[in-house]
Amino acid sequence: MPKSFSSLIPPQPEILMQLAQQCRQEDPDIACIAELIMRDVAIYSAILKEINSPYYGLSSHITSIPHAIGLLGIERIFNQVRLIILRNTLSKTGRMERFWDTAQDVSRLSTVLVDKLGVNINRDVLYTLGMLHDCGLPLMVQAFDDYRDFLKGIQGYDCSALQQQEAQRFGFSHYQIGARMAERWHLPESIAECIRLQPELIDVLEDRVEADEQSRHLLAVLTLAQDISAEYRYYWRINPNDTNPRVEAALSFLAVPEYDYLSLKETLIETMA
């Protein structure tokens, strides 16, 4: 067992600290930021691949980091660098393909839902939350040899019950460790809050638990994206049998009729197949 809760969280790489320092300046040096990114060929290549993906919908092919920064802005590029490094760091656990496939499903579904439902949320923050909402899972797998077996023994996917069982067995939950990692890596506060509050989703959306308004909207859209993704693929062999109450709370909060959502859900599942 790890010596402490904090020992599970990997430290930020030097490049992230250097980029953060540059981005915080009143007049950031774009050339310096681009140079830092281009020093790492893997990150450089991954950034260009992501920026030229359909998600960004750019009309022309981007071939340089300075060009990408000019089009998308420093903050969006920094966010992508951070996501790429986080994914590489968390993937060192091994055999995480299904986890990341699901995370990507949830991310992309979240951004589609925002557009379809007309919800006013920062798409980049939502995308990042979709990718990292369960980022504590790989850390738990890495720290505890029996964590995979523990998950396979869970009946259903009741977030609140899962958090309680994790806390009893390991001392803390993957939601708690994921939120702490988001804070340690200086992600937006709303992302850390949403990761931590997932087990309390219904109480959060029904205003029984205090949360930022943006976080409530992020959690509501994330819940619908998780529901749609669960219809398409299951990860960790957890059957999401507590989905309906959570979805109902999300739809009520967003004022979306159930019929409209079910129709949209069916359409999106067909596009994923």
Image: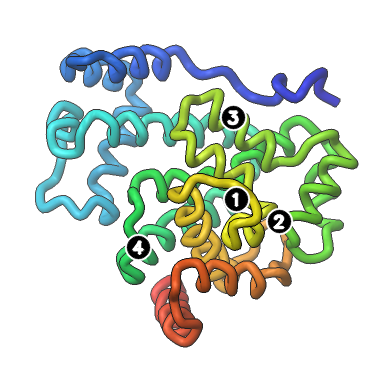
- Amino acid under disc 2: Trp
Pointer 1 or 4: first along the chain = 1
Pointer 2 or 4: first along the chain = 4
Pointer 3 or 2: first along the chain = 3
Q: What label sits on residue 119 in the rendered view?
A: 4
Pointer 1 or 2: first along the chain = 1
- State how far apart marks 1 and 4 are (Cα): 27 Å
Pointer 3 or 1: first along the chain = 1
Which element carries disc 3, helix, strand or loop?
Answer: helix
- State how far apart marks 2 and 4 are (Cα): 30 Å
- Amino acid under disc 4: Val
- Amino acid under disc 3: Met
Q: Are marks 1 and 2 in contact (CB under 8 Å)?
A: yes
Residue that numbered label 1 is attached to = 99
- State how far apart marks 3 and 2 are (Cα): 21 Å
Q: What crowding class fits label 1: few (fewer than 14 Cα within 10 Å), some (14-19), or many (20 or more)? A: some
